Amino acid sequence: MPESTQNNQLLNIASILVISIASVCILVFTQKLLVPFVLAIFLWFIVKTIVRLLDKMDFFREKIPSWLKTISAFVVIILSIVFVGQLLISSVQNLSNSLPLYEANINHILAKINEAFDINIISMATNYFKDFNFTSIVMNLINSLTDIFGSVSVILLYVIFLLLEESTFNTKLQAMVDDIDNYKRIRSILAEISHSIESYISLKTLVSFLTAFLSFIALWAFDVEAPVFWAFLIFILNYIPTIGSLIATGFPAIFALLQFGDWVQPLIILGVVGGIQLVVGNVVEPRMMGNSLNISPLVVIVALSVWGAMWGITGMILSVPIMVVIIIICSKIPALQSIAILLSEKGNIKKSES
């Protein structure tokens, strides 16, 4: 291999590493600015999805103007956020009032284990979990949700401006790109990204809602406190690939153990909620979504870890849509198609036609 070619390859690798490190630093240090904007894009796609679903009906497609459908979809989202927020506030207040009872039940359960097996588990737990504070864990979880809802006004403002910008985007894009072929190519890439993300969001939202609704019925039937809160938590966590459903199954069961102070009912709840997750996640979701995302399972796990480390729970939720965008963009750029192939599920990608 000629020395100049080898030097160019090393230079390209070094450039990629520098760009990657710089990008990660930017994403970490600008988290508070970027996360609300990315969530706004997420909501913007939901608005577009609702409008697209309405356009499938003859009445809405022919009789209702596009701007009215967009406003209606946006208003529905706002009302849904307000409604869910009010329910969550009520549920969180009930949970906060019951925290002393939960801590008392922990000691009661540990005392039962100590009496049955003659193991001083309280002392062992104290040694291994000196910094464990159940109340602080619950309050941190509640505060995280509060922070998300506290940013709702900023997120909705971003969504409004995205909707306003949408009407003039094509004109600006065409003015930026002189070559009509390049313009069509960029439009094709954007359309493919939009279609993939809209499909993912709509199907994942439907699956998550079904899981949360069935779990709510089960938790309500077993008289678990604040079933609306746990159902909402299940709904949100189901957007996190792989581990989200596991965490969503464990939380209600653990809190049922703390609420009732025995093992029978929590184990039943674990089995019922876990069964709902298993059926919906392994039967319903694959039938609905298929392999449309074309992402390697290993890439999903790695992306989950990386984006989770950078942006926390929000990064975990957005990891799959972000990887969809990266794969589509890389597949359309000849120099980056090898990356798209590596990230895809079976190496099949729609390459650029240039």
Image (cartoon, rainbow, N blue to C red):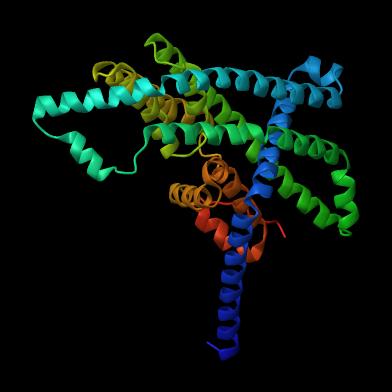
In the image, taking residue 60 as reference, residue 174 lies left or right, namely right
Examine the rendering and report whether any part of residue 19 can be seen: yes
Instruction: Give the residue drawn at x 88%, y 42%.
Output: 168
Q: Nearer the viewer, residue 309 or 292?
A: 309
Q: Quadrant of the C terminus?
A: bottom right
Q: Residue furthest left?
A: 118
Residue 186 x/y as whole percent: 77, 52
Taking 57 as reference, is 343 above or below it?
A: below
Residue visible at 74% across and 47% down? 188
Whether 332 is drawn above or below 58: the answer is below
Q: Is residue 273 above or below residue 147?
A: above
Identify which residue, 96 or 265, lies in the foreground.
Answer: 96
Q: Name the spot of residue 309 as percent of width and height, x first.
A: 50, 51
Horizontally, residue 288 falls left or right of residue 155, namely: left
Q: Is residue 275 visible?
A: no
Outermost residue toward the bottom in this view: 3
Q: Residue at image x 43%, y 35%?
A: 136
- Residue 276: % across, % down: 40, 22
Quadrant position of residue 314: top right
Using residue 212 as the reference point, say whether residue 107 is left or right of it: left
Q: Quadrant of residue 63?
A: top right
Quarter-of-image position of residue 22: bottom right
Image coordinates for residue 221, horizontal then vertical, percent: 40, 9
Tell me which residue sits at (30%, 43%) in the image. 130
Front residue of 238/109: it is 109
